[in-house]
Amino acid sequence: MTAIVAGRFDSFSTAESVASRLKARGFADQDLSLFYVNPPGQHAAYAVGGDHAADAGARKSGAGAIAGVVIGAAAGAAVGAMLVSALAAVPPVSILVLVIAVGLGAYLGSLAGALALARDGRRNPVTGQPPVRNAGVLLAAHVSSGDTAAVADLLRREGAKDVERADGQWVDGRWVDFDPLVPPVPADGRRQAPGSRPRAE
């Protein structure tokens, strides 16, 4: 594993200009890589499209639906029994009222149970959204451990967004184990707000 610092740009021309500045500082062509990262959900990891086999937030919803059916059916039976006694219904009508109440309770319980557990615990506390890698042109630099901060600062000064540091495999001028589904880890621990421009230092 080698150290990699990368920054996201809005255009190839801007990223190429910054790559030229890095080359002027002594980086070889084999130490720099430019590539486009598609928007989240459009990485075609599956033949039918999408990035994941199942929505991470929906993984527990099945258990919630089952629990909701049991609780909802019990509540529906209780409400149905109260309706039967309040209406003083005779057996054919009372059975129909009980069946409808139990069915409606089970349906509403399954819906409520599934929705209650259909959440993703890996959400950003500020935005409420799950962490994702934003789309754009990524300029990645293969760096030594001593160059990490300087390269990150240069990328930030030149307008890079989501400046990140990673440990990965660099082969023939490419970051070969790059995974667009993994959220970026900020190079200095600061998370930039989405769409914000870094200030010049």
Image: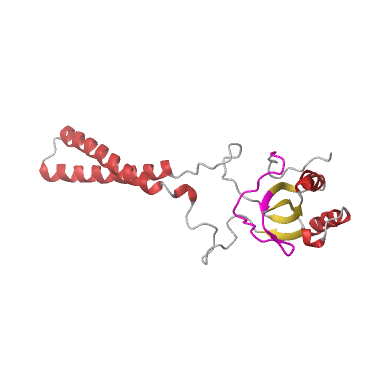
Magenta stretch encompasses residue 183: yes
> From where the camera sits, is residue 159 visible?
no
Farthest-out residue, bottom: 47
Residue 53 included in the magenta stretch of the image: no
Query: In the current view of this chain or complex, which residue is farthest to the right?
Result: 24
| 123 displayed left or right of 165 | left
Name the residue nearer the viewer: 115 or 163: 163
In front: 28, or 37? 28
Residue 116, placed above or below residue 15: above
Report x, y in % for residue 90: 11, 40
Please state the horizontal and vertical placement of residue 88, each as a whole percent of the image: 13, 35
In this view, the residue in front, 31 or 187, is: 31
Please give the range of residues in magenta: 166-190
**Picture quadrant of residue 142:** bottom right
| Residue 63 position within the rendered picture, expressed as x and y whole percent measured from the top left | 36, 46
Image quarter of residue 77: top left
What quarter of the picture does the C terminus occupy? top right
Residue drawn at 70 percent across, 55 percent down: 136
Can residue 110 be seen here? The reply is yes
Magenta segment, principal secondary structure? loop
